[in-house]
Image: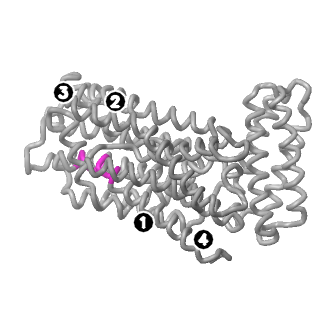
Amino acid sequence: MFGLDTTLTVLLIICLLAACFFEFINGFHDTANAVATVIYTNSMKPTVAVVYSGILNFTGVMLGGIAVAMGIVNLLPMDALVDSNPYHGVAMILALLISAIIWNFGTWYFGIPSSSSHTLIGSILGIGLAFAFLPGDLGLTAVNWDKAKDTGLALLLSPLIGFSVAIIMMFIFKRFIKNEIIYKEPIPGKMPPIWIRMLLWITCGLVSFFHGQNDGQKGVGLIMLILIAILPGQFAIDASVNLQSVNGNVNKIELLMAKADTTVLAKKEKILYAEVMKYSDHFEEVTVNKFNSDEVGLKERFSLRKDVIKITKNTDKIIKGGNLTLSANEIKELNHEIKATKKLIEYAPSWVIIIVSLCLGLGTMVGWKRIVKTVGEKIGKQHMSYAQGASAELVASMGIGMASAYGVPVSTTHMLSSGIAGSMVAKKGLKNLQKGTIKTIALAWLLTLPVTIILSGGLFLLFRAIL
C-alpha cells in the first residue's frame, strides 16, 4: 500500500480504524445533546429521534466544508511533527487517538456529558508538549500556541455563552409566546401540540446538523493528520490544484513583502521575513513549468507543503506584528494571497469526508441512552418543559453554527448542557439545578484538558521509544 512496508501498512490501518472509532464514539456520546430534548418532551420517539439525528449529522459533515478540520490540523504544525521516520508519525497519531478514546469512552460509560472537542485538543497539546522531552530544539514551539489560544478561548466561553443566552431566550419566549402549554411539564405518554413538536423537531435537526458540521470535521482533520504524517508524498498537497495558480499567489506575496521596509521590523520578524523569501524562492524553483502534483516527486511534494506553511504563517505573523510598512490595501491584498496559497494544503479527499460522515451518523444511532438520561433528567430538578428544550437547542445550534462558520472547534456538549442549565435557572433560579450533576459535569470539564494532556504526552513518549 503506497510503497509502505507491511508493518507500517498495518499501523496505518490501525490508525485509520482508531480515527473512525473515535468519530463513532463521538456520535453516540454527543447525540444525547440533540435528542434529549425531543425525547423528554415526548415530541419524538427515541428510535425515530436517533435515526433523524444520525441522518442530519451525516448531512452536516458532508456539507460542512473543512475549516474546522484545518483548525485541528494546524494546531500542531506538520512541519515540526513530521520527519523522515514515518513511525514517529504513527507514534503521534496512536497516542492522540488512544488518549481521546479512553477519556471519551470513560465519560460516556459513567453517563457524564463531556466535550469531545476538549478531549481532542488536550490530546493534541499533550503531544506537542511532549516534544520538549525529545532530543532537538523543538520544545514548546511544537505547539501552535496562537491557534491553541483561539481554540481554548472558544471552548472556555461556549458554556458561559450557552448558559447566559438560554436565560435570555426563555425571557424572549415568555414575552412573545403567551400559550402556557409551552412552559408546563409534558404529560407522560402524551404528545404535545403539533406546533410545539415542529419547533422541537427543527431545533433538534439544527443541533444535529451543526454538530456534524463542527464535530464531524474534527474526524476529517484527524484522518488528514494520519495521512499527511504517514503518507506525506501522497497527501501533503491537493493534487487537483494547479501549481502555477499557487505559484502566482506565492509570487505576489513575495513582491508585496519586498516593498516593505525591513529596517523597522523586530529581530524575530526579520528572521520570519527572511524565511518567507527563502521558501518562496524554493517553491517557485520546484514548480517552474509544472502544473500538477504528478509532475513533482513524492519527497518534493512534502517540501512544497512545508514551503506553503512557512510562507503563509510567517507572513501572517509579520502582519499581526504591526510593523509592516505597507498600505491598508496592500495588506488586504496580502491576506487574500495568503488565503489563496493555502488552498494547496488545506483540503480533504471526498472519501475521507464520506467515511467520517458514516462513522458519526452510525455512532449517533447507538449508545445514546446514558448521556440522554443525564441531560434530560439530572441537570434540572424539574422535568424539562417544551420551552426549555427549544431554547437550549436554539442556543446550541446558533453557537455551533457560528463556530463552524469561523472554523473554530466548539463543544456541542458544553453548549447544550449549559443551555439546559440556563433554561432551568430562568424558571426558578439556581435552586432549580441539581448541584451534584452540575459539579460532576464541571469537574469533568476541568479535568479533561490536564488528564488528556498527560495521557497523550506519556503515550507519545512511550510509542516513540518503542517504534
Dot 4 or dot 2, earlier in sequence: 4
The residue identified by callout 1 is: 358
Q: Determine the CA span between mark 1 and mark 3.
A: 39 Å
- Where are the magenta residues, as a range? 29-38
Q: Determine the CA span between mark 2 and mark 3.
A: 14 Å
The quarter in which the C terminus is drawn is bottom right
Dot 1 or dot 4, earlier in sequence: 4
* Numbered badge on residue 224: none
Q: Determine the CA span between mark 3 and mark 4.
A: 55 Å
Which residue is rendered at x = 39% and y = 60% of the image?
Answer: 24
Q: Decide: marks 1, 3 in contact (CB < 8 A)? A: no
The residue identified by callout 2 is: 163
The residue identified by callout 4 is: 8
Image-quadrant location for residue 265? top right
Packing grade of label 4 (10 A; few <14, some 14-19, many >=20) is some
- Mark 2 residue type: Phe
Magenta-drawn stretch contains 37: yes
The residue identified by callout 3 is: 432
- Mark 4 residue type: Leu
Which residue is rendered at x = 87% and y = 61% of the image?
Answer: 286
The quarter in which the N terminus is drawn is bottom right
> Of the residues tagged 1 and 4, which is closer to the observer?
4
Q: Decide: marks 1, 4 in contact (CB < 8 A)? A: no
Packing grade of label 1 (10 A; few <14, some 14-19, many >=20) is many
> Of the residues tagged 4 and 2, which is closer to the observer?
4
Residue 198 appears anywhere in the view = no
Return the x and y of residue 261 as percentages of the image width and height: 91, 29
Return the x and y of residue 194 as percentages of the image width and height: 19, 49
Viewer-closest of 280 and 80: 80
